[in-house]
Amino acid sequence: MPKLKTNRAAAKRFRKTAKGFKRTQSHRRHILTKKPSKRKRQLRSPSMVAKQDLVRLEQLLPHA
């Protein structure tokens, strides 16, 4: 049986928490001048991964 390998791209994007996995939100990297301050402020907080994607994420991060 081969060793289980962690997907390194997923490991950099997701962090395991007690309730599941947290992720950062998109649309916060560039073209920020036209976006309202309220939208940029709300994009700051991390969000949780949807429960439909948890099975796939468990395969990508077997040791998390």
Image: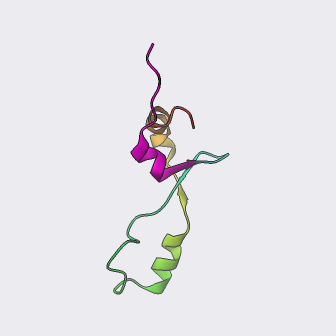
Q: Nearer the viewer, residue 3 or 51?
A: 3
Question: Which residue is depicted at the point 52% across and 71% down?
Answer: 44
Question: Which residue is depicted at the point 48% across and 34% down?
Answer: 55
**In the rendered picture of this protein, how many numbered marks are placed on residues?**
0
**Does residue 50 sit above or below 40 in this rendering?**
above
Residue 56 location in percent, x, y?
Answer: 43, 36
Residue 32 location in percent, x, y?
Answer: 37, 81
User: Horizontally, is 61 left or right of 26 in the view?
Assistant: right
Magenta span has 2?
Answer: yes
Q: Quadrant of residue 47?
A: bottom right
Name the quarter where the C terminus is drawn: top right
Q: Residue furthest right?
A: 18
Q: Nearer the viewer, residue 8 or 40?
A: 8
Magenta span has 30?
Answer: no
Residue range of the region highlighted in magenta in the rendering: 1-15
Name the quarter where the N terminus is drawn: top left
Residue 61 location in percent, x, y?
Answer: 49, 37
Q: Residue furthest top?
A: 1
Question: Which residue is depicted at the point 52% across and 74% down?
Answer: 42
**Does residue 35 sit above or below 49 in this rendering?**
below
User: Horizontally, is 62 left or right of 28 in the view?
Assistant: right
Residue 27 location in percent, x, y?
Answer: 37, 69
Looking at the picture, the colour scheme in use is rainbow
